[in-house]
Image: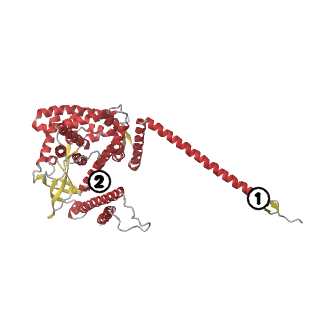
């Protein structure tokens, strides 16, 4: 009920703002009372601001309505009662995402976590037809399912952990019975991922586990020690496919289109098609979806002749994803992905411009990009992991030249695994060399003294990291712009001198006024002390 009222209030406010913006530019029919002149129209900037507020409220109302519907499925109805009671069910579900391995103490994948959407749930002779998100926890057979498949399984329903977005969990007691084979593209992508892992098995252990994760998102073979080392030095974003990989693939496709001299519209179509296939290959994770949608909007703007609006593209991507799935708003991974992109857009270009021209631009970018992302992501990271990665910037800067060859060569090798295995092996071998460099960088940085320092937890840790980010940004500006720093110090010195002089002048005036008041008071006291009134400076006493 509360969400319904909130949706109605947001919709009404949005309608009011939009109608006000639409009517703001119309000419007035009546003249104003004063002077017989018509009141001035709103400026274009004012109307744009009012319209933006109205659209934002409308989008917020749509997201609230979506959340209200999802909340009703989770807390009300027969499925919610079955989850609360922990009943045994037979469910027909549709796979909504790629399976993820839940590793045991030895590092082996003992169980698999699969996000699904219910189609039909049978329990106690009652058949429930509803679409609600669940997470299935099953054995090894569940690791081979692909998104889009319709499966039948038996198990026990359990409530979801606090803070989770799914309606509940299903502890599967049987292997999945396939009702449909699933989309051909998804099945092909799963087969290619499996073949790529097998094709990379000849590499040394670190590259063997890291390369599939950086290329296809498969981290099942990643060594636990390497994973801990990358976590300690702030390189966990490299252990799986992220938005950076998506951007690299999109950029490579656009370069190839330019090399073949394709026109703007065909080049955009080819780039978008390749990006869509890459997303299908690696799976629709939050960061990949954000980067893919942002890249699609950017390509569309390039096809229309409008570029250089990264912040607008990011806002459109975030709004589109949140409207399609408001649960992403509770995902720390999605938040970190958006913050990293926002930092690169807002701070990255400025830091690159601050670095002296004598420094090569590629080197300046390799420092500015991880630094700008770290400045905005740091306060959120300490909430998840209350420690300070001392060498995070240095490790990411050292590894950044190695990420692009791993991503591009590895991605090119994926389709060749089935078409030309010998060519795929050659590309995998070269990409493995760069992957070994990334792993060696992480292990070396993790072994340095003080690589992971303790940090306060909760709100104090968040605020202190925000302060550290601001100070770091100021230090970078001061170090790269010493002349500007000296000029600002001189300006601050002159301002301080002016303020001190003004303060001294005010104090002197106050003392002067106070001394005058005291002098007048003493003069009046001496006049009354002679025994007779004084008028006009003359004595007026009697002559008796």
Q: Is residue 544 left or right of residue 297?
A: right
Query: Where is mark 2, residue-wise?
Result: 329
Across and down, in percent, residue 244 comes to: 26, 42
- Quadrant housing residue 478: top left
Q: Is residue 496 left or right of residue 335?
A: right
Residue at 69% of width from left, 52% of height from top? 515
Q: CA distance from mark 1 to mark 2?
A: 78 Å
**Which label number is shown at residue 525?**
1
Q: SS at mark 1?
A: helix
- Quadrant housing residue 210: top left
Mark closest to the chain's N terminus, 1 or 2: 2
Q: Quadrant of the N terminus?
A: bottom left
- Residue furthest toward the right? 544
Say if residue 512 shows up in the picture: yes
Vertical order, 357 against 504 (above or below): above
How packed mark 1 is, by other alpha carbons closer than 10 Å (few <14, some 14-19, many 20 or more), is few
Residue at 23% of width from left, 61% of height from top? 73
Vertical order, 1 against 309 (above or below): below
- Quadrant housing residue 472: top left
Q: Quadrant of the C terminus?
A: bottom right
């Amino acid at each position: 009920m509360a969400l319904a009222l909130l949706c109605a209030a947001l919709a009404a406010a949005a309608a009011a703002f939009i109608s006000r913006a639409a009517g703001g530019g119309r000419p007035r029919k009546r003249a104003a009372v004063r002077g017989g002149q018509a009141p001035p129209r709103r400026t274009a900037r004012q109307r744009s601001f009012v319209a933006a507020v109205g659209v934002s409220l409308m989008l917020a109302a749509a997201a609230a309505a979506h959340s209200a519907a999802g909340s009703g499925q989770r807390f009300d109805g027969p499925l919610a009662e079955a989850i609360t009671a922990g009943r045994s069910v037979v469910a027909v579900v549709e796979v909504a995402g790629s399976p993820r391995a839940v590793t045991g103490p030895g590092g082996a994948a003992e169980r698999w976590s699969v996000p699904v959407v219910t189609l039909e749930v049978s329990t106690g002779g009652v058949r429930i037809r509803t679409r609600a998100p669940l997470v299935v926890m099953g054995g090894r057979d569940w690791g081979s399912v692909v998104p889009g498949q319709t499966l039948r399984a038996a198990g026990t329903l359990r409530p979801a952990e606090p803070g989770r977005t799914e309606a509940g969990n299903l502890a599967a007691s049987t292997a999945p019975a396939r009702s449909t084979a699933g989309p051909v593209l998804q099945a092909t992508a799963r087969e290619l991922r499996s073949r790529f892992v097998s094709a990379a098995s000849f590499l040394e252990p670190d590259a063997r586990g890291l390369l599939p994760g950086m290329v296809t998102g498969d981290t099942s073979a990643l060594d636990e020690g390497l994973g801990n080392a990358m976590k300690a030095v702030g390189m966990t974003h490299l252990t799986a496919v992220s938005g950076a990989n998506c951007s690299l693939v999109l950029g490579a496709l656009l370069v190839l289109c330019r090399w073949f001299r394709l026109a703007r519209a065909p080049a955009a179509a080819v780039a978008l098609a390749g990006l869509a296939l890459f997303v299908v290959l690696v799976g629709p994770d939050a960061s990949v979806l954000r980067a893919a949608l942002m890249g699609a909007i950017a390509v569309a703007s390039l096809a229309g002749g409008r570029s250089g609006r990264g912040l607008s593209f990011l806002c459109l991507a975030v709004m589109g994803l949140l409207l399609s799935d408001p649960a992403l708003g509770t995902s720390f991974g999605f938040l970190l992905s958006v913050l990293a992109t926002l930092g690169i857009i807002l701070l990255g270009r400025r830091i690159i411009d601050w670095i002296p021209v004598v420094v090569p631009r590629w080197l300046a970018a390799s420092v500015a990009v991880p630094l700008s992302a770290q400045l905005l992501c740091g306060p959120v990271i300490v909430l998840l992991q209350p420690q300070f990665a001392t060498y995070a910037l240095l490790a990411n800067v050292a590894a950044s030249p190695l990420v692009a060859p791993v991503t591009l060569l590895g991605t090119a090798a994926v389709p060749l695994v089935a078409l030309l295995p010998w060519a795929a092996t050659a590309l995998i071998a070269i990409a493995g060399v760069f992957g070994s460099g990334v792993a060696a960088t992480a292990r070396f940085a993790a072994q340095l003294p003080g690589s992971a320092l303790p940090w306060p937890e909760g709100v104090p840790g968040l605020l202190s990291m925000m302060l550290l980010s601001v100070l770091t940004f100021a230090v970078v500006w001061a170090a790269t712009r010493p002349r500007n720093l000296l000029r600002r110090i001189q300006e601050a010195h002159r301002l301080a001198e002016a303020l001190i002089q003004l303060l001294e002048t005010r104090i002197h005036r106050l003392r002067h006024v106070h001394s005058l008041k005291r002098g007048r008071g003493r003069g009046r006291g001496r006049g009354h002390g002679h025994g007779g009134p004084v008028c006009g400076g003359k004595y007026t006493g009697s002559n008796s």
